[in-house]
Each structure stands twice: as structure tokens, then as C-alpha cells.
Image: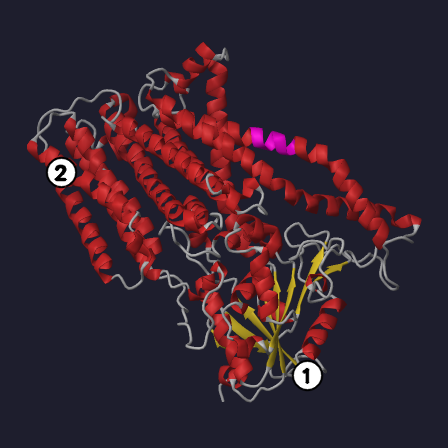
Amino acid sequence: MDQREAGGRAGDVGVVELRVHGVSAIGPAELLDRPHVRQVAGDHRGGFYRPGPEFHEGGEADGVTLEAYRWNNLPAGNAVRTLSMVILLPFMLINLAIWMRPAAAGSDPVIKALCRLLALTLTGMYVLSIVGIALDVIAWKCMSSPECLAGRSWLSWLGGRPAGLRLAVLALVPVAAIALVWRITARPALPAHVPRAANQPLPTHRLTAVGRWDNEPLVGRLRSIHVAAAFATLDLSLLGARAAQGLSIGTVALAATSGLLLIMCVVLLCTPPLTTPTERRLDRLVRVLRTIALGLTVLVWLHILTSSASWPERNGLPGYELTVVGLFIGQAVLLVVLGVALFSHRDRQPHVAFSLRLGALAASVAAINLALTFSAELVYRVSDILNRGAPTAQASISSPPHACIWAILGFSLAVLVTLAVAGVESLATRPGRIRAASAIVARDFPNAPTDATPRLRQVRRTMARARFTEKLVPLAVLYTCLAGIGIAAVTLGLLPTPPSELIQRYVGLPAGFVNFAIGAGSYLIAALFLGLIIGGIFAYRTPGFRRYVGVLWDLGTFWPRAAHPFAPPCYAERAVPELTCRITHLVDSGNTVVLTGHSHGSALLAATVLQLPPRVTDRIALLTHGSPLRRLYGRLFPAYISDEVIHEIANRVDWRWVNLWRDTDPIGGRVFPPPQQPDAAPGTFDRTPSVDRRLRDPRDVTAAPGDIFPPPIKGHSPCEADRVFDEVVRDLAGRLQ
């Protein structure tokens, strides 16, 4: 009999401990702590594993069958995919914004439409950045300058050619860039959608829909709309340059058609049927729109190529800088409207901090600022190379648009000021955090020997650093405000005066110092981009590094693509239905199941529990450890993770839920608020304190007999190796009998 079939057959009756890892897992062998494992369900991307046949079925003498679900290959990948993920990072952030909206139902349609429109502007920014490099800097400026072409045979073959020919040839670069992101995201997400069973409970909370996400129809429509808008943006950029030669009937007709295409894309994004899976007419409409955009691009390309009259080749690409600044102004207007929409519903959630109600705005600003910065850096860096490193003020060959320089200045100042405030905040709050940590350490180790003082000091510092997580929200708000100001400052790019001269005139800083700051900011952005690439590769190669870097990526890719189709695919769309199917199979086979989830695995299990019918939830228990449900998800996604949802999860499993947490963990924490003084009505009983159980970390500050090192500080590490973990599993299994 096949091992997969044997491991999944209905004859395995007893208690199954199903482990779901977090961001730190390497493979199923490490998760199960067994040298040999076998896969019993799933595939290489995500699958279920059990110990090999040479071991006892559960690896324990108490009859508990161990099983592990490995999902870390769903959001992970090789180095090439990691590079694509870095490019798609702004798209992921804008996609997060639509899920970070407040819980007020009345604001949903407006906020969703605004987030999708902002996502469309990011696609436009992506296209315009490539247009700026290929058409403005290279085709228009450099190829019309003998000084720029000198010694560059890879460019000089087009030098002296008509401007129309140069633009037509270099227009293939943005076409390839659009095709690249289209190709990367054109494949379906991670399919494992399981239709709702007839006896499955209807959704009562928004998180309940996570296992029923089947977003491929929506993603397909968004993809067609964004591809059409991308080609329309390229067409208008080419036609804007062609208009400088003189208006003609063909130019006006093509420009009007391209503008109408963009307007239709905007209207479709605000149409309520956009999210209706069965709306087949809309599917046909967006496909026709995309086909028209492709055909129109071919016509525009031929129109540019066949232009015979001379073109005025001075300054930059006609209309390009005005288009870029106009896009930034449009983004600023949309951000203001989004902020008003969020602010107008602030009183609907009195229990949520005001700064968290503006999470959608913060994510949108961060996405736009990051995309703007990367785009500006690409244009600036190419210009610097073509100018052979000449200072910005002296760059006469292919100087970058002023808007790009303002964008680099704005981002650099926002980052540096935020880092400076973070340093001051860290120093200012450190005494208070140390005092709180000292009180915990004194309670945990009251009789520590004198020689354990260095170890106690290390434990205190670790706890104090872990408490700094709560300070990140105000810092994120500060960065959002500064980044918003930086985006608004980009409009100064319309002025003919270079930024260095303008700042010298009105601020008093020397122009040389400003140019130095611009260059330093450019290298800072390049280092950030390179760091993201290296960090992404190491995050999927080094488990310890992934534990801290991968947590942010897994947090972002937990949510489906509902705003931007070029965002990375959502792993929960597959993982939650897959877990639902497997747990149901185990219960229907006569087993009781103890679900254990670490870190983001606890979020997957929380969403899974909400999918299961009562006949299944009656025979399961839940153990979470290092869970970010309340500390991260509850803060960032108040519409989906709230006290009401967490209580519902506990009720579904009849409060057979234990959450293990450590004071040294900077990511995980309690899932219920700390218990207060009893003020409940007579006859009532609060069951929430029975869920959260604190683990002392480290286990001791002195070395055990026969060892020279004290127990390690585990922080966010999984708890499977802790003795308490096995005790809780046995206790929960006993409560299921």
C-alpha cells in the first residue's frame, strides 16, 4: 500500500496532534523532531507529514499520533522569485491597505474603491518609471547628444536617427516591463478552494470568509484592468511626445481613445459587480478592454514609427514631467479622500486606538512612497551613469526630472527623521522597559545566585527589547506623516528651478550640500533595495534570519489580492481549505484532534476553526504558541481580528484552547487582554484567563547539573521542546475524551 494512502486511511483512530509551523520552520523532520518522516497528503508546496514507519505511529508512548502541516513553501521560493517579490513589494503594501480598513461596514465600498484606485496609480507609476528611463533619459536626451553617445556603441547605433524611430525602438522596453509583471502574476494563485458544505455554518465574522476565499475571478478582472491601464499610460506618453511635432487627426484620435480606456478602467474599479464571482459579462468586458488596449498600443507604435517630420529635441520628453507630477497630485488627492473616509468613521470603534483606525491610509502612503522612491532612484541612477558621474547641478546631458530628485530627498528625510526619533524613543523608554523587565525577572528568579547576575542582565535586556514592539505603531504613524509630506513635495518638480537652488534660496542651505544630500540619499535607497533582495534570499535560506524578516512577508501574503493583481499570491487561500479538509477527514475517521500552531500558524488555525462545522469542532482542541493574533493581527486588521472574533474561536472549541506566550517574545503574546479586577455580574464566570498561560523564559539562569551553559533564551522560538507543551497537549487530549 502507498505510504500516503496508508497515512491518510480511515483506520487510524485515536488522538492526532496536528502541528502547524510559523515562519521559523525548516522542514517536517524538524517540526516533528523525527529523523525520518513520510508525506501522507498534499504536495511539495504544502503537505501533511508523519513520522516514518520505523517509529511508533505518534512517536510517543501515550498513543498520540503526531502529524505536521508544512506550508512555508507556499509564500517562499527561489532567488528569482525572491527578486520578483522585492519588485512587487509596493503592490503588496497597497493590497494590505484594503484589509486594514476599520470595521465600520458603511465605509467599506468607498474605502475599497479608493484603495483600488490608488493601486491603479501604482501601476501607472511603474510604467512611467520605465518610460522615464527608456524614452526620456535614453531615447530623447542621451541619443540626441553626441557627448552622451561618445564611447557607447550599444547606444550610438541609434544616435542621429529620427526621434520617432528612437522612441519606437525604446518603447519596447516598457512593453517588456509590463509583460514581465503580467507574466509573473498571470498564473493562478495557490488553488485549494473548497466549496462550503451544506451543513457548514454561515459566516458570522469577516475572518470566517478566509477559507472561502476564491479570489481568482476578481484577480483576473483586476489584472485585465491594470494591463489595459498600463498600456494606455504608455500610449499617452508616446502620443504626448508626438503632439510636440504638431497635432494631427490620428494623434488626437489615438490620444482620445487612450484617455477613454483609462477612464473606463477607473469606472470599472469602482463598480460593485467587480467582486461578484458569477458576473461573466464583466469578465468578457475586461478581456475586451485589455485586447483593445493591446491593439491600440500597436497602432500608437506604428504612428510614432512612421512620423517623418522633425521633432523638437530640447529639454526632456514633451509632457513627461507634467504627467508624472499630475500622477502624484492625483495620488495625493486620493489619499486625502481616503483619510477623510477613515476619519469620518472613527466613532464606530471606540475600543480601537485612533492611529490603528487609519491603518489603511498608513499602508497606502507607505506603498506609494516606496514605489515613488524606487522609481525615482532608477531614473536618477541611470541618469547618473549616462552623465558619467557628473554632479546633478552640472548634468546637462541626461539630467533626471526634478520630481525624481524631490522624491529622493523626501524619502531620505522621512527615513532619517524616523530613525532618529526611533533612537530617541528607544533611549527615552528604555528605563521604563528595564524596570518592567526587572520586576518580571525578580519574580521569576527570586533566589538566583550572585554569579548569575550577567545572565539576569541579559534576560532583562531581552525582555526590554521585546516590549519595544508596542512603540512601533507611533513610529509608523510618524513615518506615514513624513512620507505624505514628501509625496506632496514632489509637486515642486513642476518648477523650472533645480531643487538645490530652490532650497538654497528659501532655506539657506548651500547648493553643494544639497547636491551631496541628494547623492547620499540615492545611495541610501540603492542600499535599501539591495538589502531587500539579499534579505529576501537569506530569509528563505536561513531559518534564524527568516524568523524575524519573514514574519513581515508572511503577514502581508496571508491576505488575498483584492486591490492590486500584481501583489504576491495569498497562501491562506490554499492553506486554510487544505487544513479544513484534512481536519474534517481525521475527525470523520474517528479521531480527536489537538491543533497546535506557532506564530503565523496560529492565524491559519484560527481561520480554519471558523470554517469547521459543529460536528468537527466538538472533537478538536486548540493550542497556540508565539501567536501574533492579538499583538499584530488585532492591531493591524481590526475589522477581521477583534475581541469578538477571538471569543468566537474559543466558543467554537468550547474553550478547549491554551495559548502559551513568553515575555521575551517580540512577536507573539496574549490572545486575551490581561485579567482585570472581577467586576462581572453575580453568577457569571470569565473563562478568558484559562486560555493564556505564560512561560518563564529562560527556564533557569544557571546551568543544569552536567552542563556548563544555562538554558537558552527562546523568545519567539516554538514551544514544542518545552515540557509544558507536552503537558498541555495531554490535558487538551484528555478534555476531548
Residue at the far front in the pictured view: 682
| Residue 80 at x, y percent in the picture | 42, 53
Part of the protein shown in magenta: 417-423
Is any atom of residue 279 visible in this view? yes
Crowdedness near tag 1: few (<14), some (14–19) or many (≥20) residues, C-alpha within 10 Å: few
Q: Residue at x 66, y 79 (%)?
A: 736
- Under circle 1, the secondary element is loop
Residue 622: image quadrant is bottom right
Give the side of residue 553 with respect to residue 667, left or right: left
Q: Residue at x 31, y 30 (%)?
A: 326
| Residue 372 to residue 624: above or below | above
Q: Residue at x 83, y 54 (%)?
A: 444
Identify residue for label 1.
63
Give the side of residue 335 with respect to residue 426, left or right: left
Identify residue for label 2.
254
| Residue 674 at x, y percent in the picture | 71, 54
| Residue 371 to residue 598: above or below | above
- Determine the CA span between mark 2 and mark 1: 73 Å
Q: Earlier in the sequence, mark 2 or mark 1?
A: 1
- Quarter of the image where the C terminus is located: bottom right
Residue at the far left in the pictured view: 249
Say which of 239 and 729 sits in front. Answer: 729
Q: Amino acid at mark 1?
A: Gly
- Under circle 2, the secondary element is helix
| Residue 448 at x, y percent in the picture | 90, 52
Q: Is residue 54 magenta?
A: no
